[in-house]
C-alpha cells in the first residue's frame, strides 16, 4: 500500500479493515501486506484519498 | 514490568472518563495515549448536550466552551429550511460547541486529579491474556515498557486494536463506518448566530453536512459519508459543498480534520474476562447524529465504576457483565431508537427529503428535541410512520 504524504493517520482505514491488518501509530500506518486480500475497503473509506494500491 | 489494577488505552473523552471513575472508586489506574497531545487533532464537530454534561457531573468551563447552541437549522436538498430556534421554541436538548483540544485535556486532567497516572506518546503494541489479567506491551519514543493489569479498558477509538486483539468484535463493519472530514473555518457568514446547521441529501450520501458555530465568524464545516453509498471521497464532497455555499464564499480553513465514525450501534460484546470496551471502540455513538462524546463518556463512566468494584471482588466476565447491563441501560434508549431513524433517512431520495421539508415548513414546534422532530416526521410521512411508528 502506498500511503500518501498527506495522510493524517486518522485511523479510518484501520477501522474498516475487515482483517484488522492496519496499525495506526501517531505518525505512521503499518500494513500487514502479507495477509491483505486486496479488498480495497480501506482505499475507498479514506476521507482524503491518501491510500493507493501498489500494482 | 509495571503492575497496576486498571489500564485504560486511549485518553479521549471515553477513556478519560473510565480512568477517572475507576480511580475515584479506589483503583490504581494508568491511562495510556499514543498521541503527543491529548485532544489533538480533534476528531469531530464538537457538539455536546448540556444535560449530557450535567448527567456526567461535569461543570461547564469557559475554557472549553466556544458557543452555546441556540437553535437548529435543517436544510433539504432544494434549499428548504427548517428553523428550530430559541425565539420560537424551548430547547431541552440545548448544547455547547466545545473546543475539543482543551476539553479532552481537561477530562484527562480530571482523571489525573482523581489519581490516575497518564502516559502520553505511548503506543500499545500488543496485549496478552494471562490468568488473572492482561499483559500490555507499550512503546514510547523508542523505549519499550511492559505493564500488567487486572482490568484492561479499551477506549482506543474506532480504529482501535485492543478489543480485537482480545477477540472481541470491532465497533463497526465497513458499511457502518462513516468517512468524515471537516474544516475549521473563519469568515463564515451565518444567517442566524449560534445555530447548528445540518444539510441533508446527496451533498453527503449516507451522512450529512454540518456547520457548527464556534463563536464570531468561526465554524466547523464538515461532513460524513458512507463510502458504499458515495461516488466520491469525503473531501471531494466537502470541497463541492464549500464552493457552492453562499455562507462560505469568503470562508478560509485554518484546520482540516479527518476520521471515521462508527454508526452501527453498540457492539455485541462489550466485555470479557478482565476486559471492557467503551467509547467509539464500542460503538457508543448516536447513529443518527454521529455524536459520541456524551455517550462515550457515559460508557466510560460505567466501565470505570465497574472496574473499581471488580478490583475489590472479581475481574471475571461474570462480574464484568454488570458493565454490559448498565451501559445498555444508559445508552440503548438513544442508540437503538436513533439507529432506526438513521436507517429510515438512508432510504430517502432527495425528492422525498424535499417533500418532507415542505410539509415541515407549515408545522410549529413547541420544543426542540430529536424525538419531537421524529414525531412530526411520522405525522407528515406515511413512509416514516411505517418505519418509525414504534419510535413514538
Image (cartoon, rainbow, N blue to C red):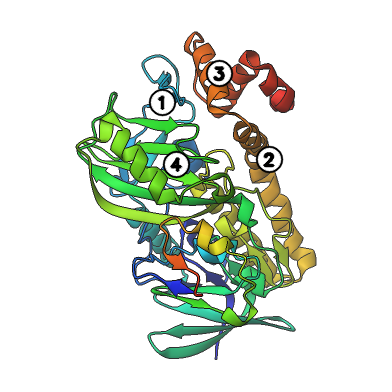
Residue B368 lies, in percent from the top left, at 49, 23
Residue annotated with mark 3: B356
* SS at mark 4 in the image: strand
Mark 3 nearby-residue class (10 Å; few <14, some 14–19, many ≥20): some
Q: Residue under mark 3: which chain is it in?
A: B
Q: Residue under mark 2: which chain is it in?
A: B
Which of pointers 1 and 2 lies earlier in the amino acid sequence?
A: 1
Asked whether residue B20 appears in the rendered view, the answer is no
Q: Quadrant of residue B330?
A: top right
Look at 65% across and 32% down and name the residue there.
B344
Residue A21 lies, in percent from the top left, at 59, 74
Return the mark for residue B149. Answer: none
Q: Quadrant of residue B131?
A: bottom right
- Whether tag 1 and tag 2 are in contact, CB under 8 A, the answer is no
Same subunit: marks 2 and 3: yes
Q: CA distance from mark 4 to mark 2?
A: 19 Å
Left or right relative to B250: residue B165 = right
Same subunit: marks 3 and 4: yes
Foreground: disc 2 or disc 3: 3
Return the mark for residue B336. Answer: 2
Residue B91 lies, in percent from the top left, at 45, 24
Q: Residue under mark 1: which chain is it in?
A: B
- Whether tag 3 and tag 4 are in contact, CB under 8 A, the answer is no
Residue annotated with mark 1: B73
Amino acid at each position: 500500500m502506498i500511503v500518501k504524504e498527506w495522510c493524517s493517520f486518522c485511523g479510518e482505514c484501520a477501522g474498516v479493515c475487515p482483517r484488522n491488518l492496519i496499525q495506526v501509530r501517531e505518525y505512521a500506518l503499518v500494513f500487514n501486506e502479507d495477509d491483505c486480500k486486496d479488498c480495497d475497503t480501506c482505499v475507498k473509506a479514506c476521507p482524503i484519498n491518501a491510500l493507493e494500491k501498489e500494482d | 514490568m509495571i503492575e497496576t489494577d486498571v489500564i485504560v488505552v486511549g485518553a479521549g473523552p471515553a477513556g478519560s472518563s473510565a480512568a477517572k471513575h475507576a480511580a475515584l472508586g479506589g483503583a490504581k489506574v494508568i491511562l495510556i495515549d499514543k498521541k503527543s497531545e491529548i485532544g489533538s487533532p480533534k476528531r469531530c464537530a464538537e457538539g455536546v448536550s448540556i444535560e449530557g454534561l450535567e448527567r456526567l457531573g461535569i461543570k461547564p468551563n469557559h475554557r472549553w466552551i466556544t458557543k452555546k447552541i441556540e437553535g437548529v437549522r435543517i436544510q433539504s436538498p432544494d434549499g428548504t429550511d427548517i428553523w428550530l430556534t430559541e425565539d420560537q421554541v424551548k430547547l431541552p436538548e440545548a448544547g455547547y460547541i466545545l473546543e475539543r483540544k482543551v476539553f479532552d485535556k481537561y477530562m484527562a486532567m480530571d482523571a489525573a486529579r482523581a489519581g490516575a497516572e497518564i502516559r502520553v506518546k505511548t503506543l500499545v503494541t500488543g496485549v496478552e491474556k494471562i490468568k488473572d489479567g492482561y499483559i500490555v506491551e507499550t512503546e514510547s519514543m523508542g523505549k519499550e515498557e511492559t505493564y500488567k493489569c487486572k482490568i484492561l479498558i479499551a477506549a482506543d477509538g474506532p480504529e482501535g486494536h485492543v478489543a480485537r486483539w482480545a477477540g472481541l468484535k470491532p465497533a463497526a463493519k465497513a458499511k457502518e463506518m462513516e468517512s468524515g472530514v471537516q474544516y475549521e473555518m473563519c469568515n463564515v457568514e451565518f444567517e442566524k448566530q449560534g445555530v447548528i446547521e445540518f444539510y441533508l441529501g446527496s451533498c453527503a450520501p449516507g451522512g450529512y453536512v454540518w456547520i457548527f458555530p464556534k463563536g464570531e465568524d468561526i465554524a466547523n464545516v464538515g461532513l460524513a459519508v458512507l463510502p458504499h453509498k458515495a461516488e466520491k471521497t469525503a473531501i471531494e464532497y466537502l470541497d463541492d459543498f464549500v464552493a457552492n455555499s453562499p455562507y462560505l464564499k469568503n470562508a478560509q480553513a485554518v484546520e482540516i480534520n479527518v476520521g471515521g465514525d462508527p454508526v452501527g450501534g453498540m457492539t455485541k460484546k462489550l466485555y470479557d474476562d478482565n476486559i471492557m470496551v467503551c467509547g467509539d471502540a464500542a460503538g457508543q455513538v448516536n447513529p443518527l447524529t454521529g455524536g459520541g462524546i456524551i455517550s462515550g463518556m457515559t460508557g466510560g463512566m460505567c466501565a470505570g465504576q465497574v472496574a473499581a468494584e471488580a478490583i475489590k471482588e472479581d475481574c471475571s466476565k461474570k462480574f464484568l457483565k454488570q458493565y454490559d447491563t448498565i451501559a445498555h441501560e444508559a445508552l440503548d434508549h438513544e442508540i437503538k431508537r436513533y439507529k432506526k431513524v438513521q436507517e429510515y433517512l438512508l432510504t430517502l431520495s432527495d425528492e422525498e427529503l424535499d417533500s418532507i421539508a415542505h410539509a415541515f415548513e407549515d408545522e410549529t414546534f413547541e420544543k426542540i428535541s430529536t424525538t419531537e422532530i421524529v414525531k412530526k416526521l411520522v405525522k407528515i410521512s406515511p413512509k416514516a410512520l411505517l418505519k418509525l411508528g414504534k419510535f413514538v
